[in-house]
Structures are given as C-alpha cells and as structure tokens.
Image: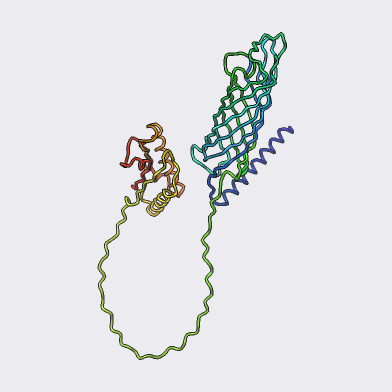
C-alpha cells in the first residue's frame, strides 16, 4: 500500500509539473526548436538470455550519456556504463555473476516528430541504433562448481568485445530543460560474453528509467513585441493676430478639366503563383522563401474564393528515384504545413509530388522546388 501511494504521488507531481510547463510555454509567445547539448543518467535492470527462469538472470545496470539534438528528428549520443551480468551453468543449474563496462555511439530518431514538430508536445517517442565495444572482467575462473559440465570455453580475465544495439524509448517533458526517460534496448555481442560456448551471439536486454537535461532548453521563445505608439505631446496653440481686412478680390472660376478615364485594374490570380526553392537534399524553408509563402497566405486570406494546388519536385542529378520521390513529397508537405500555420484552411490546399520524373526548369538546381498555383 505504501508503494502504491508513493507511485500515485509521483504521477500526480509529474502531471502538475507538465501542466505548469505547458501553460508557461503557451503564454510566453510561440516557441521554436533550439538545437541543444544534453546530458542523461539512466538506471535499471539488465537481463542476459540464458537457460533458466527470467528473474534469476536479472542484474543491475547504469548508464551516463552526452548527446546533441541537431533538429526535431535527428540526434547523436555517446553512452557509457554497464555494471553486472549473470549467466547459468547447465548440469547442475547454477547462476553466476560477472562484470562489464560498455561504450556506445547511438543515432537517435524522434518518431513523434516524423509526423510534425510540436513545441508543446509532452510525450516524445524515440528510437535508436548504435554500436561500440564491451569490456568484460571478473570472470577469469570457472564461475560455477567443478562438477558442472557446461562448456566454459570462453573464460577470460579481461576481454573486449564488439557490441551492436537497438532500442525504443519515451521522453516525458517535465520542464523546457528536464525530462523523464523510459527506455528498453537490446544489446547483441559475441558468444564470449557469458563464458559459455553456444555458437551464437549473446543477447542482453535493458529496461531503464532516467533523467535528461537539455542545456539551454529544447526550445527558444520568439517574443511578440506589441507596436506601441508614443504619446503625442500636448500642443499649446499660439494666439493668432487679429485678421487684417483686405480688399475683396474677384476670383475667376478655374477652368473645368475633364479627367481621362483610367483603365480598370484586373487582379490576375496567376500573378500570385509562387515557386519555393530548397537546398540539396533539404526540406527546410529558407527565410527568403518563407516570405513568398507569407505573401501567398495573405492573398488567399483576402480572396477566400480561391484555392491553391502545389506540387513538389527533386533534381534528377541528386540521389535516386526512390529518395527523390520521398524528398519531393516531404517538400510539398512542408509548404502545406506552413500555409496551415499561417491560417489557411487545409481544405483549400491540395498537394502532389513528382520526384525527379518531371523537371520543370532547364537549370538542374532550380528543380528542387515546390510550385504553388492558385485555382
């Protein structure tokens, strides 16, 4: 009962903290992503697959990480840690312990941000893949009784082994800098890891909980400055001199000049079509291209009877057909998302993409483009 009450308090405190964080961010102006360095500490349980019941092969594990988040989706971290592993003899069944340290480099991918970045998102799901080296020690003698017939052909005093890993986790934001992390991962290493010869790789699983701190925060605020006009100075009227009586002059009427009729200005919607150009292999909107999208959004707001159709392209001299098809689709989606963010109803926007199968411009570099046409 005490444990259950403690967990309820922890969940409630986390909920209050997250709610306060979201309210604080929402009231301080629209935030945007900030590339940042972060530190992470994790602890939990490790399980090395063996031939006995699961819980008998559980042992403690702890890790420290330093990483850098380049954009809302992609990051890189360096991880160091380890602690203890367990294995078992077979005849008779005996459990033994050994120690290890592990160093890895992980490429991380935010699964949530793949579908659009949200600075107010509290729960961020991520995946990672990486590799490195594992240093095993304290296993130089036979780890079970002399009568055990297990094939301990890989005993060592110290041994450095390659290791690959993959995992998935959840990042729960508590503040703009601090988050709670839950992670599960699988480490695949040499058959030597637990001393026994089995002619197959050894598998170790980790379930970890931890804290991550983003130095400087994950987002930065774009402050909105109100346009405040200065107070007009009080003007004290000067006393005017008494008017001087002048002789009344006879003013002849000015000749009537007939104004020539001005031609009627016709607004042509096609004059407001835009081309949004991108850098090689990029989907980021450059500032000068964003000004075009803002102008298009203002025109659509002023003319609600019009819609817009856009099509994304990729240049044929970069990448391959599969990559370019995906790239042109994401470019078209980015321009659409920007128009929606500027207040244009999603029902007024249609999208298409051609990859590198169509090259609208003769100059190759100009074909990294999204063409938006008013209809």
> Residue 137: image x %, image y %?
67, 22
Q: Residue at x 36, y 49 (%)?
A: 306
Q: Nearer the viewer, residue 118 or 303?
A: 118
Answer whether residue 253 is visible to the viewer in this image.
yes
Q: Is residue 103 above or below residue 219?
A: above
> Residue 85: image x %, image y %?
67, 22
Q: How is the image coloured?
A: rainbow
Q: Is residue 163 left or right of residue 244?
A: right
Answer whether residue 18 is visible to the viewer in this image.
no
Classify residue 172 by image quadrant. Answer: top right
Classify residue 231 by image quadrant. Answer: bottom right
Q: Is residue 112 above or below residue 144?
A: below
Q: Quadrant of the N terminus?
A: top right
Q: Nearer the viewer, residue 163 or 292?
A: 163
Q: Residue at x 27, y 64 (%)?
A: 262
Q: Residue at x 28, y 61 (%)?
A: 264
Q: Nearer the viewer, residue 289 or 318?
A: 318
> Residue 364: image x %, image y %?
34, 40
């Amino acid at each position: 009962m005490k444990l259950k009450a403690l967990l309820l308090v922890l969940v409630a405190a986390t909920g209050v903290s997250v709610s306060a964080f979201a309210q604080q961010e929402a009231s301080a102006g629209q935030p945007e992503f900030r590339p940042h360095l972060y530190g992470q500490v994790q602890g939990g349980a490790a399980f090395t697959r063996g031939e006995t019941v699961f819980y008998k092969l559980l042992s403690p594990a702890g890790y420290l990480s330093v990483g850098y988040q380049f954009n809302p989706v992609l990051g890189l971290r360096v991880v160091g840690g380890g602690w203890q592993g367990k294995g078992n003899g077979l005849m008779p069944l005996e459990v033994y312990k050994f120690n290890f340290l592990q160093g890895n480099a992980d490429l991380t991918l935010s699964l949530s941000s793949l579908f659009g970045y949200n600075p107010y998102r509290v729960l961020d799901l991520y995946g990672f893949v990486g590799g490195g080296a594992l240093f095993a020690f304290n296993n130089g003698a036979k780890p079970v009784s002399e009568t055990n017939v297990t094939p301990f052909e890989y005993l060592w005093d110290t041994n450095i082994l390659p290791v690959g890993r993959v995992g998935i986790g959840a990042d729960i934001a508590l503040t703009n800098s601090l988050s709670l992390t839950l992670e599960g991962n699988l480490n695949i290493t040499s058959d030597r890891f637990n001393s026994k010869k089995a002619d197959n790789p050894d598998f170790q699983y980790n379930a970890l909980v931890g804290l991550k701190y983003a130095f400087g925060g994950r987002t930065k605020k774009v402050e909105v400055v109100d346009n405040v006009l200065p107070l007009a100075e009080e003007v004290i009227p000067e006393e005017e001199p008494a008017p001087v009586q002048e002789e009344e002059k006879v003013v002849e009427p000015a000749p009537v000049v007939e104004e020539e009729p001005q031609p009627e200005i016709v607004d042509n919607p096609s004059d407001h079509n835009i081309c949004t150009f991108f850098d090689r292999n990029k989907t980021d909107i450059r500032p000068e291209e964003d000004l075009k999208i803002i102008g298009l959004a203002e025109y659509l707001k002023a003319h609600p009877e019009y819609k817009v159709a856009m099509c994304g392209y990729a240049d044929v001299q970069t990448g391959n057909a599969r990559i370019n098809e995906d790239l042109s689709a994401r470019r078209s989606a980015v321009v659409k998302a920007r128009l929606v963010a500027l207040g244009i109803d999603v029902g007024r926007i249609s999208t298409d993409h051609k990859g590198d199968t169509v090259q609208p411009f003769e100059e190759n570099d100009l074909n990294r483009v999204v063409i938006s046409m008013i209809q």
